[in-house]
Amino acid sequence: MKLSSYLQWKNLQHPVLTEYQTELWLRYTSCNNPDISGNKLLKLKYQLKQALQQKYPGLLTFGGAFSNHLVATAAAAAEHNLKSIGIVRGEEVDINNPTLTLCRSYGMQLIPVSRELYRSRHDQPWLEQLARQFPDYFQIPEGGTCKAAVQGVSELDMCNTPAGPASLLICAVGSGGTIAGLIHGAQNTPVLGIAVVKDPGLPDKIKQFLPADHSWPEWQLVQALHQPRYGHFDHQLWQFCLAFTDQAVQLEPIYTGKALYTVFELIKSGVIPAGSRLSFFHTGGLQAIKGLAYRGLLPGSEPA
């Protein structure tokens, strides 16, 4: 498939943008399967290619019980007639939650492990043990973040909006792979990452994908300004997400919604100068909304 056929732009409208004479262009990816949209489509591109070239019959990866990445990997595997295994954090996992139900519908085998063991997901001894246990499965890191993922994201043109060159590229940041990819492809355009996790080591994780012998564009990482703890949000943030539905824009409050809320606050405070043309990457993850409703975490919803 040609990636260009799945890239779209949306010019957001909002009173704050009008007041500060700021353009905000939403950039998003989509394909025939919405469960592989957003940054996952880009992060999995070259890992899938490698698995297919090396003739692996399946994919193995890691994630929490409501992981967007697990769903995307399961869907991508099914699209390419591959088997898939998901190592799921937590030995007491409700395999009937909407996320894991979706994974299973794509044929993914789910293996819950203790939180203690899950912490070893980046450790070579456990990865080698899994490779021996499942030799037919190509391993993909949690969140898909690796050099191949950064390469995939780097090919996304965020710099040239339909109205002209952007003055700033922006995305939500979790594991660091997406912003690293944007920096790689940013040419000379500054990049701003909105961290939706409290991880002191996040800047170093990003820098590992930015070799010191190269001159990179200016980039900055700021903490989300509203409910910065990962997975936490309130009625105000959820209402902010819903405010864009009349523009046919759907946001979830864990990544994109929280990051976009922070952008609006930075505009109002003058940190992002008035008159800017912003290019914001919508990283997808909309399946998470069903999981939030299932747990009774959305205002007006009840636990299942």
Image (cartoon, grey):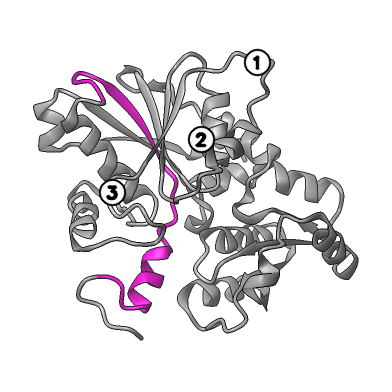
Circle 3: residue type = Val
The percent position of residue 47, horizontal first and vertical second, equals 72, 46
- Residue where numbered disc 3 is placed: 249
- Give the magenta part as a residue range: 272-298
Q: Closer to the camera: disc 3 or disc 2?
A: 2
- Mark 3 or 2 closer to N-term? 2
Q: What secondary structure is marked by label 3?
A: loop
The percent position of residue 85, horizontal first and vertical second, equals 71, 69
Q: Is residue 11 left or right of residue 116?
A: left
User: Magenta includes 56?
Assistant: no
Q: Residue at x 30, y 55 (%)?
A: 227
Circle 2: residue type = Ile
Q: Residues within 10 Å of mark 2 (few under 14, many from 20)?
A: many
Please state, as top left, top right, bottom left or bottom right, where the C terminus lies in the image: bottom left
Q: Residue at x 70, y 41 (%)?
A: 46
The percent position of residue 198, horizontal first and vertical second, equals 44, 50
Above or below, comparing residue 141 to residue 152 in the picture: below
Q: Is residue 12 visible?
A: no
Q: Quadrant of residue 289?
A: bottom left
Circle 1: residue type = His
Q: What secondary structure is marked by label 1?
A: loop
